[in-house]
Image (cartoon, grey):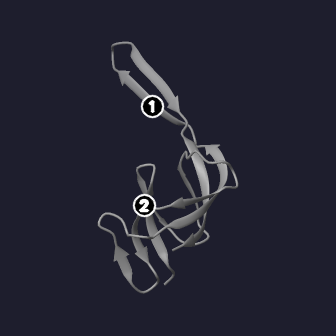
Amino acid sequence: MEAYAVVETGGKQYRVQTGDTLNVEKLDAEVGTKIALDKVLALSDGSALTVGKPTVEGATVQATVEDQVRGDKIFNFKKKRRKGYSRKIGHRQSLTVLKVESIA
């Protein structure tokens, strides 16, 4: 079994391994820069699992910012029958594409 980590960023949790590419909530970082995700909730070295209370002390995940993109459009539609009321609204979330370099 390979080493993995559970990290939190943007209010969401992600299970990552070295070489993974993931889309997270927008981070203020330029494309090509290296960032450290230090909110590591769990860390596995392949055989033993370390669970943090709430985070694992000294553990970080190094990642490189590959792109700043926008996600798919999500539509919200409301309607009240027989009242002539309908409302359609759309939203596109700004995302940051990260490539995990190392887990330590």
Q: Is residue 99 left or right of residue 81?
A: right
Q: What type is the residue that disc 1 sits on?
A: Asn
The label on residue 39 is 2
Kindly identify which numbered label has been placed on residue 87: none
Q: Foreground: 23 or 9?
A: 9
Residue placed most toward the observer, 34 or 83: 34
What element does badge 2 sit on? loop
The residue singled out by tag 1 in the image is 76
**Residue under the image location 61 percent in, 53 percent down:** 97
Most distant residue in the front direction: 58
Query: Quick one: label 1, few (<14), some, or many (20+) residues within 10 Å?
Result: few
Q: Earlier in the sequence, mark 1 or mark 2?
A: 2
Q: Amino acid at mark 2?
A: Lys
Which residue sits at x=31%, y=63%? 54
- Which mark lies nearer to you, 1 or 2? 2
Dot 1 falls on a residue whose secondary structure is strand
